[in-house]
Amino acid sequence: MMEPLLTARDLHLSFGASPALAGASVDVAPGEILALLGPSGSGKSTLLHCLAGILVPDSGEVGYRGIRLDRLSDDLRSELRRSDFGFVFQFGSLVPELSAVENVALPLRLAGHKRRTAEARALEWLERLEVGEVARKRAGEMSGGQGQRVAVARALVAGPRVVFADEPTGALDSLNGELVMDLLVGAAREQGTSIVLVTHEPRVAAYADREVVLRDGALALTVGA
Amino acid sequence: MSVPLTLLGLLQVRPRHGYDLKRAYDAHFGHDRPLKPGQVYSTLGRLERDGFVVVSGTDRDGGPDRTTYAVTAEGVTDLDRWFAEPEGPAAYLQPVLFAKVVLALQSGRDAAQVLDAQRAEHLVAMRELTALKKDADLDRVLGLDFALFHLEADLRWLEHTAARLDRLGKELAR
């Protein structure tokens, strides 16, 4: 495996008395699509949140391009998330008060781009994800599948190095789930973006280059190179 | 479903005579299709001929004499190979996977490892099928989807079973 982009080493994290991670270690290579599988409560979402710098482990190391994420301040981690990472969640990824194009333009606006430039680029991404027609609609006025494709556009618009996707198809039927995965994976492959994907659906995990199965907060099985 | 390997597995748990073997098989694996007595004895004959079982004694138990069979070292090696090798990810695997899990637990093998090896085999197959879907015509895609949905169902069963191994082990030990 080439030099990893992201590394987790021996992560432990407990919420109160219950351990969510108990010695989890994993690497993510540049451009790699990694799926985290496992039963509910196995720690897969917690591992994703630690890799993304949303949560800080109680012990262990999280590295991103030579930076110790677990040692950065909250502010620096937030900045890094904005500049280098994209996110897609199962529900509620979009800001309900904003239109689709405003939602997708948001990461660019936060990075200091002018509204007109940001929205033009956002519109290109909406069209690429085949949802150009909902550009002026708000989240409540779109179908679930359209909303997730808008969320994928927003995750990718600023050219992140990593997209973190937590059950991105969990609320979709199988056809819409497949469409979202085809578009997400296709776009990520084109621009060399890594994806860390949490899913309980093997058909979704099958888009990955490598699957790891978590059990009781640690890796139980790795499938793939 | 491999009847010879399943019978061999049951004989590794303990030596048994033909009727006892049929009873054990039917109790765990023969709900829908119990073994015919003739099938048990013909299979035992073949296993003995191939050196996988030997006659270990006779058991009278108040009735007529019954020949008891036990697994040989060669038979154990054959079983080890069966447990270690995941099944090809084909349709209708559940009976053989279930037999492997039950017999692994009963013979003191690592049943979780049997399930994990199978899970890896299935995930690899699913990844290959998913890759084939890219740029394929719709009729081909639908055929691949059929295989993918079936493999996914198997995987869900594997996960479900993995989560219940402790309980299954306890029930089998009763």
Image (cartoon, rainbow, N blue to C red):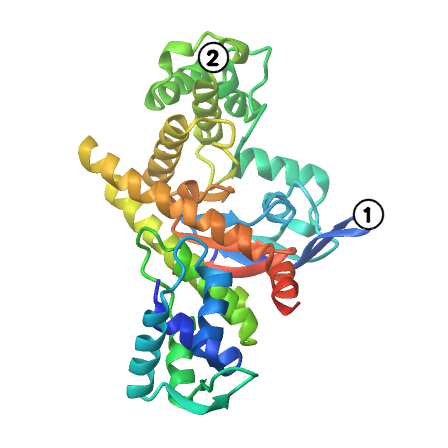
Image location (x, y in percent) of residue A44: 59, 47
Q: In this view, does A64 lie to the left or right of A211?
A: right
User: Label 1 is placed on what type of residue?
Assistant: Gly
Q: Which of B39 and B79 is in front in this view?
A: B39
Q: In this view, does A199 lie to the left or right of B170?
A: left
Residue B80 is marked as: none
Judge whether residue B118 can be spotted in this image.
Answer: yes
Callout 2: SS? loop
Callout 1: SS? loop
Image location (x, y in percent) of residue B20: 49, 74
The chain holding disc 1 is A
Judge whether residue A5 can be spotted in this image.
Answer: no
Q: Is residue B166 above or below residue A53?
A: below
User: Label 2 is placed on what type of residue?
Assistant: Met
Q: Is residue A18 left or right of residue B35?
A: right
Quarter of the image where the C terminus of chain A is located:
bottom left
In which quadrant of the rendered view does residue A48 lie? Answer: top right
Image location (x, y in percent) of residue B1: 35, 62
Q: Nearer the viewer, residue A164 or B174?
A: B174
Quarter of the image where the N terminus of chain A is located:
bottom left
Residue at left 41%, top 70%?
B6
Q: Mark 1 points at which residue?
A: A16
Considering every residue shown, the one lying at the far right of the view is: A16
Q: Is residue B67 above or below residue A174?
A: below
Q: Name the residue under label 2.
A: A142
